[in-house]
Image (cartoon, helix red, strand yellow):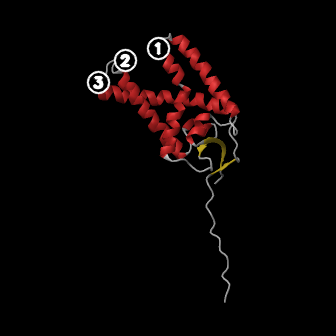
Amino acid sequence: MSARPDFTVPQPSPPFTIAPQQAPSLKRRMACWLYEGILMFGVVFIASYLFDTLSQSRHALDNRYLRMGFLFIVFGIYFAWFWAKGQTLAQKTWHIRVVSPSGQPITQTRALLRYVLCWVWFLPPLAAYSTGIPVLEVLVLLAGWVAVWAILSRFHPTQQFWHDALAGTRLVHFVQAKK
């Protein structure tokens, strides 16, 4: 009997490296969050222009609730698409990647679940706004709620945001591989 040599098939290396279980600092994640908000102005502008063209709206408050629903869907498509690819434009700038707990890219379904759960950042202030609280007070509530939600990540075992824990995702610092 001849012994067969043990061949191992080399596995392709990912185009990035992840520090094991290391979440980016809260400061970097919040800076990325703010930058993402700035980039979303462009998405809102283009989506609103498309909405106005298709609905023949002449004023930003025409079809207000339909517009909000449309923007909610557009945001969902934007984030689910980019998160399934690994990162949004702002996350690419700040070297942050969305991955599964095992470090693999997430599916479109998981990205969509993460998008829905991310609305926890805005639900209490939106609920307050719907009760007729003045806009300035809602903005103060929003700032306070964002600060509380961000600080709560310090109590997660791996320093992740709680919506990431619920969605089965995590944010990691990554370094682009050299080609």
Residue topped by disc 1? 131
Q: Please state if 6 lies on the left or on the right of 56 as rendered.
A: right
The kind of residue tagged 2 is Leu
Residue topped by disc 3? 56
Q: Earlier in the sequence, mark 1 or mark 2?
A: 2
Q: Quadrant of the N terminus?
A: bottom right
Q: Earlier in the sequence, mark 2 or mark 3?
A: 3
Where does residue 86 sit, x and y in percent of width and height? 56, 45
Label 1 – label 2 distance at C-alpha = 19 Å
Residue displayed at 48% across by 40% down:
112
Residue displayed at 52% across by 30% down:
119
> What kind of element bears circle 1?
loop
The kind of residue tagged 1 is Thr
Q: Is there CB contact under 8 Å for labels 2 and 3? A: no
Residue lying farthest bottom? 1
151 and 70: which one is in front? 151
Residue displayed at 58% across by 43% down:
168
Q: Quadrant of residue 56?
A: top left
168 and 95: which one is in front? 168
Mark number for residue 61?
2
Q: Quadrant of the C terminus?
A: bottom right
Label 2 – label 3 distance at C-alpha = 12 Å
The kind of residue tagged 3 is Gln
Q: Quadrant of residue 91?
A: top right
Is 7 above or below relative to 120? Answer: below
116 and 44: which one is in front? 116
Residue displayed at 56% across by 27% down:
121
Where does residue 141 sit, x and y in percent of width and height? 58, 16
